[in-house]
Amino acid sequence: MQFSEDSCTQPEDELLFCEDCRLYFRDSCPHHGAPTFVSDSPVPNEPTSSRAILSLPEGLVVQERGQGAGGRASSVGVWTSMTSLAPGWIFGPYEGEILLDKQDCTVYSWAIKENGSYFYIDASDESKSNWMRYVSCASNEEEHNLTVFQLRGRIYYRVSQPIEAGKELLVWIGEEYARTLGLKLGQHFKYEFGEKELLMKLFQDLQVKPLPPPPRELPLVHLRPPPKPSAHSR
């Protein structure tokens, strides 16, 4: 594990990761600059049962998953429809309701560690969550293209390899997130679980904490399809 000079004294919850350099940094990678945070589409302020689907960024689509989805949490998934996604791009934060009782967690829940204890963010309610609830968990490390991680008390998904148009987004519960939570999964933990339901069993040993303060806002960009080439550029 490598750290940039300005990140050596920072808590892990404050650090970002460069997929190209394999380097942790504070705000900006010394070689590739600041990462790209992709914003959700704006949604109405008034309560709506379709809030999650309305928050989907342009260029992504939610659709039914094919047969063979196994025990994944959702019968739908998220695909990129108009443009490819570059490694290092970040989606989030994951939105939902804060839970303090781990018994209330569902397959739409992620654990968040703060000051040695834990709370949970659950996206079961589509009127209180965002589109990230629809992203399926990868069954194994080889098929994933997103990595879940915790940043400043919130959950994000980072693109870990290029995702071409027409490909499904699949998130992996990898070493980074497991280490943040302090989960002791062994040297070969990546082969010990894949589906989200299995990680939830590990949540049972985590201790909850009171509600956190509002997080610091992060800069966002809107996901847009690439411009069409002009006649002069052909």
Image: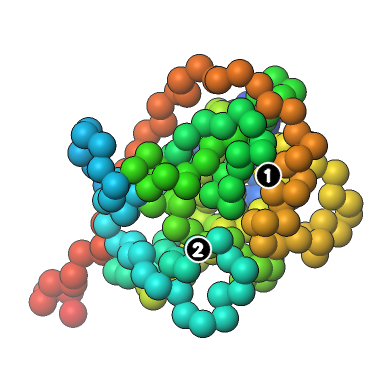
Frontmost residue, 105 versus 139 = 105
Name the residue located 26 percent from the left edge and 62 percent from the top edge: 225
Looking at the image, the residue that sits furthest to the right is 186
In the image, is 123 to the left or to the right of 197?
left
Residue 210 lies in quadrant: top right
* 222 versus 210 height, above or below: below
Name the residue located 45 percent from the left edge and 38 percent from the top edge: 96
Which tag is nearer the camera, tag 2 or tag 1? 2
Frontmost residue, 1 versus 125 = 125
Rendering coords of residue 129 (x, y %): 40, 43
In the image, is 207 to the left or to the right of 26?
right
Q: Is residue 196 visible?
A: yes
Looking at the image, the residue that sits furthest to the bottom is 67
In the picture, the disc for residue 74 is: 2
In the picture, the disc for residue 65 is: none
Callout 2: helix, strand or loop?
Answer: loop
In the image, is 74 to the left or to the right of 39?
right
Question: As shown in the figure, which amino acid type bears the numbered disc 2?
Answer: Ser
Quadrant where the N terminus lies? Answer: top right
Question: As shown in the figure, which amino acid type bears the numbered disc 1?
Answer: Tyr
Quadrant where the C terminus lies? Answer: bottom left
Residue 171 lies in quadrant: bottom right
Looking at the image, the residue that sits furthest to the left is 231
Label 1 sits on residue: 177
Q: Residues within 10 Å of mark 1 (few under 14, many from 20)?
A: some
Would you say the residues marked 2 and 1 are in contact, meaning their CB atoms lie under 8 Å apart? no
